[in-house]
Image (tube, helix red, strand yellow):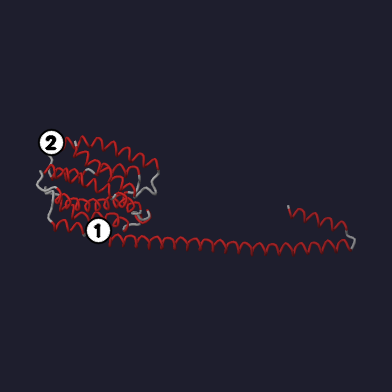
Amino acid sequence: MTLPILIVLGQLVDTYIRWLSFSKSGLPQLKTKIFKYSALWGVASIFLYKIFFDSFGVNAATYKAVLMLGWLPYFFICWRQISGLPQHIFVLGMGTICSLIQHTFVAIIILKLFEGVSAYELILAEAAVYLLLFVIFLPICGQYFINLLPNREFFELRPIGIYIAILPLIISSAHIIQIADSTLIHSDWERLSRIYLPGVFFFFYRYILTAAKNFYDLQRLERNKQRLEDRLMILKEYNALTMENQKKISVIRHDLRHSYNLIYALLESGNIEAAREHIRKQEEWLK
């Protein structure tokens, strides 16, 4: 049971790291659900892995099969709770790169510390050291993954959002295919190719962040431009309405002045009845 437990603990830590990328937007109740379902599946998978290893044996092929496929349920759990498939694919790709790098350094460590041991002991040591390194570098990885995701709007931009989402998996796919065999420890040159991976992807990821920043700036400028245009339109409408009201007021003032002059003239001439009739007509007009 030791090996299945170590594998599941590593997968749970990996799930926690990937969840941190969504922690800024994820609600507390979603966090509780994700961890609860992940823990329940982890307990179940311990027994499933044990049955699998008992049936097919513990070797490099079965160990890698569990590592390469065991993330699927955890990925599905997180995706079901937090929407946004492109973001989940992007985070999964980044997590895969992080895992590849750690496995590479784990291989170097166990080659130095566990020479001449059996295949099972070597696999057990690999799983234990991998988990230990994961826990040691958890604060650094956590801080990196917390600030990993660009804005959601960036992934919703088609088609570039899809390209960016799958970029980490594309970069890591060649190494995944390379290690998908029955060899536990690969050659120095193969491990070296996985060590330079962070440098290569750092360039691409810096491009992603730069593109994201330019995209946000452009969107912000477009929104500000639209706001200014809307305000200008409101001001024009207000100005036109003001001018129209001023014209109406001017006409009313002219009519009132004419009416007062007429009433004054009628009163001066002593035509009281005509003045009253004019006032009555004005009252009817004002109703």
The answer for how far apart the CA atoms under marks 2 and 1 are is 37 Å
Q: Which dot marks residue 55?
A: 2
Check disc 1 and report the residue beneath it: 198
- Asked whether, in this view, residue 158 is left or right of residue 65, the answer is right
Outermost residue toward the front in this view:
113
Q: Residue at x 13, y 36 (%)?
A: 55
Q: Are marks 2 and 1 in contact (CB under 8 Å)?
A: no
Q: Residues within 10 Å of mark 1 (few under 14, many from 20)?
A: some
Near-viewer residue (86 or 120): 120
Measuring from the top left, give residue 121's x and y in whole percent.
13, 42
**Dividing the image into 4 quarters, which one contains the N terminus?**
top left
Measuring from the top left, give residue 54's x and y in whole percent.
13, 35
Looking at the rendered structure, the secondary structure element under dot 2 is helix
Q: Which dot marks residue 238?
A: none
- Asked whether, in this view, residue 94 is left or right of residue 3, the answer is right
- Rendering quarter of residue 144: bottom left
Looking at the rendered structure, the secondary structure element under dot 1 is helix
Near-viewer residue (43 or 129): 129
- Rendering quarter of residue 6: top left
Amino acid type, label 1: Pro
Measuring from the top left, give residue 214's x and y in whole percent.
38, 63
Near-viewer residue (166 or 258): 166
